Image: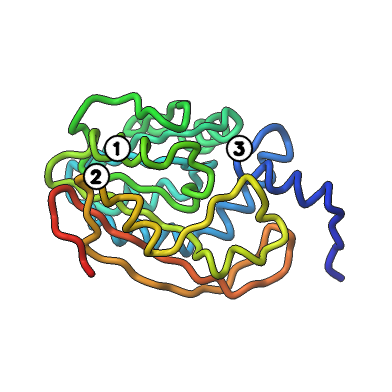
Amino acid sequence: MEKTFTEKEIREIEKQLSCPSGSNGIDIGNKMNESNIGMTKNSIQSLELRDDNTVLEIGHGNCGHLELILNASNRIKYFGLEVSETMLKEAQKINSNGQVEFKLYDGQIIPYPDKYFNRILTVNTIYFWSNAERLINEIERTLKSDGVFVLTYANKSFMKDLPFVGEKFQLFDIDDIYQLTDKSNLKIIDFQNETDEAKSKTGEKVLRKYTIVKLKKGAANKM
């Protein structure tokens, strides 16, 4: 029998999704890793990782998927950024590997030099960006000239009716991504619309529609 959630419980789930904390945050992190693994695998494939690539993931959660990235090619150097201290500590606990570095950040400024990364990845985080245009500019700044950025999100049409989606969420479709990146030097070179079956954070099975957007510095937008 499915549990019925109170409005208070639903709002707590929303809060934990935006920035997991404490024991509830650890539980949410585990559920996110499980429910998002299909999206994450497809996003990693879209990165088209090469030997010696330097990879940044924004909002890695507990990073239970890290081996998928490290095993995608040889000598991958992985860097992860989180706004959640709980998720940072969980990622460090789960993954003890000399090829990786996890850091806390403020959600806006990427604490790395210009043109540092070959690849940048983020899955299911854009809803919570406090200043999306600024973070897009930071992604552009830290990405190498031939670098690729993969942005994956569940579509607005799917997300808008979920019970835990409230004021903390900003929802997107592909037109919104074109608009968001219009003034940057990051251009959409490909996007894929996908569907999978997932377990909602409130427990029910849902047919999730999501988009994987692939962007590159200095390229022409795919229309």
Residue 94 picture location, percent across and down: 53, 38
The residue at the point 37 percent across, 54 percent down is: 151
Task: Quickly name the residue at label 1.
Answer: 137
Q: Is residue 60 above or below residue 180?
A: above
**Residue visible at 84% across and 57% down?**
5
Image point (20%, 52%), residue name = 216
Label 1: how many residues lie within 10 Å, few (<14), some (14-19) or many (20+)? some
Q: Where is mark 3, residue-wise?
A: 19
Question: Type of residue at label 2?
Answer: Ser
CB within 8 Å, label 1 to label 2:
yes
Q: Secondary structure at mark 1?
A: helix
Would residue 176 appear left or right of 157 to someone viewing this image?
left
Q: Amino acid at mark 1?
A: Asn
Query: Is residue 173 toward the left or the right of residue 114 in the image?
Result: right
Alpha-carbon neighbours of circle 2 within 10 Å: few (<14), some, or many (≥20)? Answer: some
| 3 vs 1, front mark | 1
